[in-house]
């Protein structure tokens, strides 16, 4: 088997953008490993529009957006293998993968970019009581059946969870002639983008019931009805609020989980908040030369941000190799802390010597905040205080840090991101 | 077609009996109302092989449990199924209940259970550091084990089938009559079957079947048990099967590793009167967590990947009923097979096989095939071993289920072997594809593609587990 400098695990939007950036940064020894039978990842089943507003200043469908990057990969002659599953990533960055043609093979890589994406939280993990019949799908599985395989799972639909895929599927199923009766959301706010609530539910008169959950699933062989109930502040169902909906399909859009089994086995340190790797300013994990980007790092709502993040991972992988594959030096490591409303930051640490002139720090909040401030503290000094009309868990936030600004604060140990009322 | 013996029910008892019968020159058939074997109580239980100290001394339950446990080593070798003697512990958390452990110990010794030992608090915690700080001691049974109930049932059925026993699926027995010549006529939704002997191994329906032929009515109580299955990430949270001290409702909520490396918590015990009532309830799932947490501390319930419920076929007298029905000669009940039914199943097969051998004067087959080769597993194979396999059959190079690392080769094997899989659950129970942490979200469409290609089933015909459990209903509008 040929050896490569950079092995990219996953040929979705993150892997593609990382590959293109690495190639453009001057590395010619790149291999993308993709488990599906084409490049593009989950975008291939996202046939709705709304992608690329930031990156391309136009509204593309998922496959169109993916193709912009696939075309670059092809034009640049970047190598890739399809139908190939990565089985293991060793701490020394030997990647073990498998497919029909090559069998099981191992590639000792200088740098590995983790771009495996995420998976959906299944029914079982939600502890929804009731029967376990056919007709219960995670929204993404239903999306694949409808958009790729071309089959309808059912005609009368209840959706639990207001994640973006659930909202998109509410519209998709409606357009395909199904009746979407209700979308129930456990939390008092939606987990999806505001624009999706407007365009996928409101426009079709589909009710969104916040602070509601499924308390029973009927039907031994196939779903025949679903009962939802309102939940109290403790998120436990309130007796007497049950509403029964006859239906043949229950879709679940209750959260995405970064797919990090390979990372964990490799010894990558994980964040309990994001379920993704802990990374530094270079998007590098605790294993030097192993980088992470896209939904495997933390779940994004816009693919544009995935591409941008992945580009940096690709560039940094090349930089790592060009610098002689050495562990990052420098004692000026600044810790990033998310607190008081902010749940996490990506990255978690900054080595000022290695950072770009402008560094994007992304984070999410844990609740809905109205007319509040995103504040940034350098140690105890507040250096940023931006008021926002609304800050919500469903929309990723970001702040920009200038290298010059950090250099001016000699001895800076800690940068804190928090949400303040005033 | 006249059969020598018809077995009603392809659960673990029915399949164990079928395999024993297949040793003889006999014309036998198993009738099963579902589309596959192992669809009732056999598929939703604790998946453990009990040591045998629970049942009363002298009871059939005790005898068959201990005998079944003994048989498991050889059987698992012969049928190529995973079985592990991980040992079990009955944990005592109240000082004043320590006497109960002694009682169980004494009963176990009388039942013939080997190696029992009462452990001190320190010994217990040393063996299982994640047990509650309130632990006062435990009864340790080294012969307790864990097994995959699907594979056990499927393997016995396959082996019976290879040795000539027929299986008729989607065939529900609706009425049974005896004719003037003493032959049984079984009316089903799939035509009539006749037999000289009938074995009623119908699980929770055994009372219904029994009552078709006997005036001495039987009543089975469906005792529901809810379970939670946890991710393999926490599969070693305990290494032994951890029981609380038993109550009149049974052996209580246990916490155990499974033979495939998950952690299983359950069951509750709720008497219902519904033979299909396998819906879990919020109450039941909450109770599970509360009860299990009495013995195991900080139980990682956030790692639950699925929950399910099973029904125990409970008889008021709490005893296995394995006998010829008094007012219905040539009709044998195998009823009330609740826990430890799975553990006892090989012994149940042996006992019923022996009864019929004697009654029918059966002669042993010369060409009985006693072993069965399971599905070739790729898990744990070295790179060279994998490559040898892929070279022989490239399908082993394609992973279909990413969570459990199941290849297309394994799924093809499951579909094309005797009594092969025909549904998503059929594939799942034979290969584990879809049994992992994403619960088939990723592999379902891919497995459907394989079922479509290999069996010629249209997408609309593919089911989760037979009957009305279709996955998709029609083409989308865009298709012509």
Image: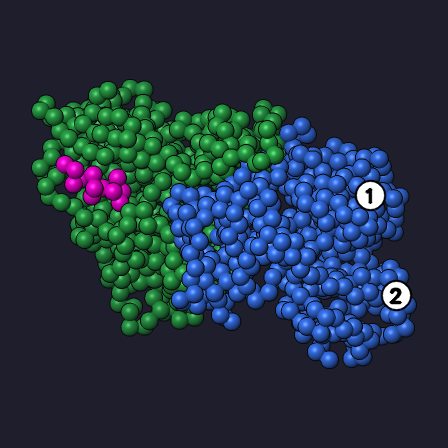
Disc ID at residue A20: 1
Relative to B404, residue A304 above or below = below
Which color was chain A given? blue
Residue in the image at 67% along x and 42% along y: A47
Q: Residues within 10 Å of mark 2 (few under 14, many from 20)?
A: some
Left or right of B287 on screen, residue B406: right
Tell me the magenta residue range: B202-213
Whether residue A198 can be seen here: yes
Query: Which of the colour schemes (rainbow, by chain, secondary structure, one colour) is used?
Result: by chain
Is the residue under label 1 in contact with that under label 2 (CB below 8 Å)? no
**Screen quadrant of the N terminus of chain A:** top right
Relative to A56, residue B117 above or below = below
Location of mark 2 (residue): A403
Q: Position of residue B218 (x, y in %)?
A: 16, 46
Residue in the image at 18% along x and 40% along y: B210
Disc 1, SS: helix
Relative to A266, residue A280 above or below = below
Q: Position of residue B187 (x, y in %)?
A: 22, 29
| Front-most of residues B201 and A154 | A154
Q: Residue under mark 2: which chain is it in?
A: A
Disc count in the image? 2
Which chain appears green?
A: B
What secondary structure predominates along the stretch shown in magenta?
A: helix
N-term-proximal mark, 2 vs 1: 1
| Front-most of residues B184 and A249 | A249
| Front-most of residues B227 and A63 | A63
| Front-most of residues A287 and A10 | A10
**Screen quadrant of the C terminus of chain A:** bottom right
Q: Is residue B3 magenta?
A: no
Q: Position of residue B19 (x, y in %)?
A: 30, 31
């Amino acid at each position: 088997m040929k050896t490569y400098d950079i092995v990219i695990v996953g040929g979705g939007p993150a892997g593609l953008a990382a590959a293109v950036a690495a190639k453009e940064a001057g590395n010619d020894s790149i291999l993308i490993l993709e488990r599906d039978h084409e490049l593009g990842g989950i975008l291939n089943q996202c046939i709705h529009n709304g992608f690329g507003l930031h990156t391309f200043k136009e509204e593309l469908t998922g496959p169109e957006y993916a193709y912009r990057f696939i075309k670059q990969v092809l034009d640049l002659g970047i190598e890739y293998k399809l139908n190939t599953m990565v089985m293991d990533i060793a701490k020394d960055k030997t990647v073990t993968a498998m497919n029909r043609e090559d069998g099981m093979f191992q590639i000792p890589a200088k740098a590995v970019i983790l771009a495996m994406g995420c998976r959906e939280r299944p029914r079982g993990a939600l502890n929804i009581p009731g029967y376990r019949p056919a007709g219960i799908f995670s929204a993404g599985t239903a999306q694949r059946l409808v958009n790729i395989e071309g089959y309808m799972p059912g005609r009368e639909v209840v959706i639990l969870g207001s994640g973006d895929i659930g909202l998109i599927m509410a519209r998709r199923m409606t357009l395909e002639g199904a009746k979407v009766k209700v979308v129930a959301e456990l939390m008092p706010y939606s987990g999806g983008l505001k624009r999706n609530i407007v365009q996928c539910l409101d426009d079709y008169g589909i009710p969104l019931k916040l602070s509601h959950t499924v308390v029973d699933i009927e039907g031994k062989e196939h779903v025949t009805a679903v009962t939802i109930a309102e939940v109290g502040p403790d998120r436990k169902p309130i007796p007497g609020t049950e509403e029964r909906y006859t239906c043949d399909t229950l879709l679940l859009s209750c959260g995405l989980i970064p797919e990090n089994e390979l990372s964990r086995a490799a010894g990558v340190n994980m964040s309990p908040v994001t379920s993704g790797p802990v990374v530094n300013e270079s998007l590098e994990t605790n294993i030097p030369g192993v980088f992470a980007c896209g939904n495997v790092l933390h779940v994004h709502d816009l693919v544009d941000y995935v591409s941008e993040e992945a580009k940096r991972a690709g560039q940094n992988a090349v930089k790592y190799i060009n610098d002689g594959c050495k562990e990052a030096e420098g004692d000026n490591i600044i810790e990033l802390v998310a607190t008081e409303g902010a749940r996490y930051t990506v990255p978690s640490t900054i080595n000022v010597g290695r950072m770009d002139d402008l560094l994007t720090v992304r984070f999410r909040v844990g609740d809905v905040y109205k007319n509040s401030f995103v504040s940034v503290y350098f140690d105890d000094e507040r250096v940023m205080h931006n008021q926002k009309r609304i800050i919500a868990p469903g929309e990723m936030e970001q702040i920009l840090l200038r290298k010059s600004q950090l250099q001016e604060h000699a001895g800076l140990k800690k940068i804190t991101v928090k949400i303040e009322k005033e | 077609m006249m059969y020598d013996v018809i077995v009603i029910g392809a659960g673990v008892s029915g399949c164990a009996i079928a395999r024993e019968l297949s040793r003889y020159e006999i014309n036998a058939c198993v009738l099963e109302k579902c589309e596959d074997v192992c669809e009732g109580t056999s598929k939703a239980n604790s998946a453990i092989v009990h040591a045998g100290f629970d049942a009363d001394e002298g009871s059939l339950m005790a005898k068959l449990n201990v005998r079944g446990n003994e048989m498991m080593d050889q059987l698992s070798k012969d049928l190529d199924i995973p079985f592990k003697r991980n040992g079990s512990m009955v944990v005592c958390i109240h000082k004043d209940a320590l006497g109960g452990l002694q009682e169980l110990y004494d009963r176990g010794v009388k039942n013939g259970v080997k190696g029992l030992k009462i452990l001190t608090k320190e010994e217990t915690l040393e063996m299982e550091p994640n047990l509650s700080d309130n632990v006062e001691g435990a009864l340790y049974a080294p012969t307790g084990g864990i097994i995959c109930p699907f594979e056990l049932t499927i393997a016995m059925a396959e082996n019976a089938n290879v040795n000539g026993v027929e299986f008729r699926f989607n065939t529900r027995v609706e009425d049974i009559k005896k004719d003037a010549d003493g032959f049984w006529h079984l009316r089903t939704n799939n035509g009539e079957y006749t037999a000289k002997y009938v074995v009623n191994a119908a699980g929770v329906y055994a009372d219904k079947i029994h009552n078709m032929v006997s005036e001495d009515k039987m009543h089975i109580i469906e005792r529901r048990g809810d379970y939670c299955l946890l991710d393999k990430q926490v599969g070693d949270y305990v290494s032994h099967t951890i029981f609380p001290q038993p109550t009149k409702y049974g052996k209580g909520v246990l916490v155990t590793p499974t033979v495939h490396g998950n952690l299983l918590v359950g069951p509750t015990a709720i008497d219902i009167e519904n033979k299909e009532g396998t819906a879990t309830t919020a109450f039941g799932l909450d109770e599970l967590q509360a009860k299990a947490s009495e013995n195991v501390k900080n139980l990682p319930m956030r790692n639950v990947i699925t929950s399910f419920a099973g029904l125990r076929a409970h008889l008021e007298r709490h005893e296995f009923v394995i006998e010829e029905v008094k007012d219905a000669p040539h009709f044998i009940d195998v009823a009330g097979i609740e826990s430890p039914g799975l553990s006892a199943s090989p012994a149940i097969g042996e006992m019923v096989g022996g009864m019929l051998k004697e009654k029918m004067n059966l002669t042993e087959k010369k060409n009985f095939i006693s072993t069965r080769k399971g599905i070739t597993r790729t898990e744990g194979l070295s790179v060279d071993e994998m490559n040898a396999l892929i070279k022989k059959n490239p399908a082993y190079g394609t992973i279909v289920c990413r969570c459990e690392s199941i290849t297309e080769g394994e799924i093809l094997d499951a579909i094309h072997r005797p009594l092969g899989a025909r549904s998503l659950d059929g594939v799942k129970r034979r290969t584990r594809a879809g049994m992992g942490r994403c619960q088939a979200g990723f592999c379902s469409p891919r497995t459907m593609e394989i079922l479509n290609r290999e069996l010629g089933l249209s997408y609309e015909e593919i089911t989760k587990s037979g009957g009305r459990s279709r996955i998709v209903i029609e083409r989308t509008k865009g298709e012509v």
